[in-house]
Structure formats: structure tokens, C-alpha cells
Image (cartoon, rainbow, N blue to C red):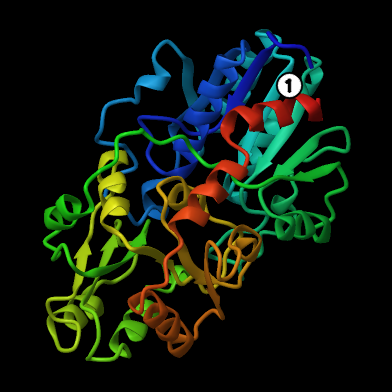
Amino acid sequence: MSVGVRIAIVGPIHPIRGGVALYTARLAAAARERGHEVEVLSYRRLYPRLFFPGRTQLDPDPAPALLAGLRVEASLDSLSPASWVRAASRLARGRPELVALQRWHPFFAPALATVARAARRGGARVVWLVHNARPHEGRSLPWGPLLRLGLHLDDRALVHASSEAEALRSLGVRCPIRSTPMPAPEVPREVLDPAVARRSFGIDPGDVVFLFLGYVRAYKGVDVLVEALRRLAPEGPRWSALVLGEWYVDRSWADRAAAAPPLAGRLRIVDRYAGEEEVARALAAATVAVLPYRWGSQSAVVPLCFAHGRGVVTTRVGGLPEAIEHGVSGLLVEPGDAAALAEALEEIRRGRRFAPAALERARARMGFPALVETLEELC
């Protein structure tokens, strides 16, 4: 594909919050930087309130500067088929040459399939950016054909872990599938002082700091982390743990754990959506990030941690073993194993560090400009 074509990206974007919205913004900015004419088709309603456990679906922060001047139409309503048809028709009239649709939950498949069908009729190449072949939660529900609805033989699919490519094939998807690493975002060059960052969270500057970052959901294993923290030896270097992110599950058990020995004064729970500034501050405060997922596909948190020079302790699920080189850029343990996780955290307390390898891993991973190049190659 030559530079300077019309690209439509279908997915949530600011003021909708969350990882997929940030991905959309970074991809759109990178495509525009490469000289493409870019527009984003977003949602005026994403999740129906009944299915959304959080406080709000909107980002309280201003739109990032990289979105200035970007054409965005927020016309998709997840519950309104009429909006799918209108949005698809309007998009097709713009004659995009490439339509990139973000797919992360089968709930949105009918809307996206409607848009993809109109795009093909208008002569566009359709690429599916599949974040999750299967949903993280509600996996036992009869999603059935929704898991592959809309993916046509003439389309292309791009995933960020080979395990997701295998999952798509197991679902009967027959279009060409390509796997590339989750892009590492560019981060500001200013280096935040870890001591200052730790004090901002009420953490002693001399502590070893374990950070959990992101929405707290059942599959992410925060309970396993809490149990692992309980197992840490009482002697040795001081440590603190910070759980930063909005809770989508009951938190009362964690509050009780944080108020009682041995975690009292060590475990800090910040139950709110963290914007980019607070995320950067938390990563500056962290010695290592800990993602004790029970299951999953891949995680955008991993390349974000690498970009900030922080190694990751996580589990052998989905595409995470592809992202983490055990003993070099982080540590891998079995999911649900609090004893093994505690042993890994003890290694961090004893001085194991991964900053140089994490930064190198971030540089080696594909960034968003390279992701745009990959989309060009697919088309």
C-alpha cells in the first residue's frame, strides 16, 4: 500500500476510556503521522449500563494532544442496529481504502460485521485487529457464531499473540491471520524521581514496590497476589504493594487484608481509574509490575511497563510467555500458584532487577508506526 491512502479505524476513542481507546488513539496518530488520511468511527454508547460494572465509561482527563484535528464520528450505539446501518453507510460513502476494526468482545460483533460488510461493498480492504479471540469473562456463555461473525475469507486478521492466532483458527476463522507483538507506546523522556513518586502514594522511598496496574477483575488474580504477599518473609528488605485501578469485583475482602497483619501499612489499594499521568507516576514508583492473571490473551500493560523500564512478574497464560523472557525481562510463574508467586517476589526483594532488559524489550517490540506499516503490508 502506498503512503497517503484513506484509512478508517473502527473502535472506541476518547472520551471513552480504557486500553482499547488508548490503542485506537495511538494507532490513528501513527497512521496520520505516516501521511495517511485517517478517520475514526467510534461509539456514542459502548456498554449498556446493565453490563458495565464500573463507575463511568468516560475518561475524566482532557483529550490527549495527539488527537488534535483527528476526524472522529461517535455514531455507533451497541444496542441500536439502526445506528450500525447508518454508520456503515456513511463510512462507505467516504470510500476508505482500508478499514481496521477492533475486536475484543463478541458483544460488539453484529455492529462490526455490519460495518465490515458495507466497507467491502465499497471496495475497502478489511483488517480485524483482534485483541481477544474469546472474551476474558463469561467464557462459559454460548457466544457460538458471534466469536467469528463478520470475519470474511477476503479479510485479514492481526493478533498480538500466537496463542490468539491459534484460538481464531480453532473457532473456524479461515482468513489470513498474522501475529505481531503488542506495540510498546512511546513515553515522555522526562524521568520521574522514584522517591517523589513513592511519596505521592504514601510509600516509603526505600521500599521495594510491587505494582498491580489495571482494572481489577476476577480473572486478573489480585487475590493470588494478596495471598503471595502474606507469604513473604517477615525479615529482609522492606516492601510495599500498590494496587492501582478501578475494582469491578467486591473489594471488602482486600480492605480487610490491607488493614490486618502482615499487610497492614504495606498494601495500598487505590480504587479508581488511573489516567496516563498517574500511571506514569505509579510505574516510576514501582520496582516491578505484578500481573498474576489466571487466564488471558495478552496484555497492553506489559509493553507499557517495558517502555517505562519496569520488568514484569506474571503467569504462563495466553501470550504472556511470548512477551516476557523469563529471568531477563521478568519472571513467569504458574497461574493461581500463590507460593510460586511469593518466591518470585522474594527474588525481587533480594535484588533481582530487569530495567535494562525491559527497556531493550520495549525498543525491540513493534511500536505503533510499525503497526501501521504492518497494516499496509497486509493490504
- Which residue appears at 36% of the width and 33% of the height? 188
In this picture, is 96 found above or below 197?
A: above
- Which residue appears at 52% of the width and 32% of the height? 24
188 left or right, relative to 334: left
Quadrant of the snapshot with the C terminus: top right
Q: Residue 292: x percent and y percent?
A: 46, 72
Q: Residue 320: x percent and y percent?
A: 60, 63
Q: Amino acid at mark 1?
A: Ala
The residue tagged with tag 1: helix, strand or loop?
helix
**Residue 344 shows in the view:** yes
- Which residue appears at 37% of the width and 39% of the height? 17
Quadrant of the snapshot with the N terminus: top right
- Which residue appears at 50% of the width and 69% of the height? 314
Query: Which of the 4 image quarters holds residue 100?
Result: top right
**Camera-nearest residue between 47 and 312:** 312
Q: Residue 77: x percent and y percent?
A: 49, 32
Query: Which of the 4 image quarters holds residue 46?
Result: top left
Q: Which residue is mark 1?
A: 119
In this picture, is 92 found above or below 110?
A: above
254 left or right, relative to 332: left
In this picture, is 39 found above or below 142?
A: above
**Residue 117 shows in the view:** no
Q: Residues within 10 Å of mark 1 (few under 14, many from 20)?
A: many
Q: Residue 113: x percent and y percent?
A: 70, 35
**Camera-nearest residue between 147 and 369:** 369
Query: Which of the 4 image quarters holds residue 149?
Result: top right
Report the number of discs. Answer: 1
**Camera-nearest residue between 121 and 173:** 173
